[in-house]
Image: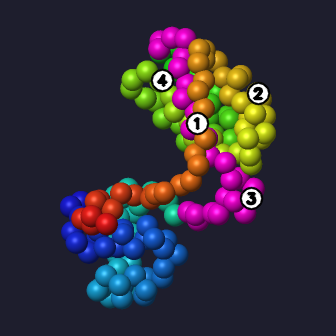
Amino acid sequence: MALDRKDLAILAELTTNARASHTELANKVGLSSTALARRQKALEDEGYIQAYQAALDLAQFGLTTTVLVRIALESQSDEALKAFEAEVVKCPSVVRCFLMSGTDDYILIVLARDIQDFERIHRTELSRLPRVARVQSSFALREIVNRAVPTVVFGEKR
């Protein structure tokens, strides 16, 4: 499926308000509600839209501390990578995990209530991960950009 300007406009609108009605979206992108619904369904069927979710204010839940955790394993063998990955998905405080190139094997994004809570997370979750040789943590001071999708996807350079 080749995306045109209308499809990109639909996707751009949904990334800012996934609860918008077909009527609202249709008015914003210049389509009838029926045409909009048909296009949105096609975008879902083709996998461009994978899910709809609510963006929560995590501070309301007391999660005010974001920690970037760099992890190096003792080995980069397939067995070591698989063992680590199988266990890191079980860590409830880890919200993202990336396999990396370079000196660190993984970067984790961890959410905590405060530094004492991160100490608990480090002790009870991170230090128990298999095959870890080194853990380095950095605390985010303030979030500057948080986009689900880079705006260049929609042809915007904001």
Q: Residues within 10 Å of mark 3 (few under 14, many from 20)?
A: few
Which badge, 2 or 4, comes first in the chain's sequence? Answer: 4
Q: Residues under labels 3 and 4: Cα distance? A: 30 Å
Which residue carries the number 1 mark? 138
For the point 35% across and 84% down, the residue is 28
In magenta, the rendered stretch is 53-77
Which residue carries the number 2 mark? 123
Quarter assignment of residue 48? bottom left
Which badge, 1 or 2, comes first in the chain's sequence? Answer: 2
Which badge, 3 or 4, comes first in the chain's sequence? Answer: 3
Disc 4 secondary structure class: loop
Q: Amino acid at mark 1?
A: Ser
Circles 1, 4 touching at the beta carbon (< 8 Å)? no
Q: Residues under labels 3 and 1: Cα distance? A: 22 Å
Which numbered disc covers residue 61?
A: 3
* Residue 38 sits above or below residue 127 on the image: below
Disc 1 secondary structure class: strand
Which badge, 2 or 3, comes first in the chain's sequence? Answer: 3
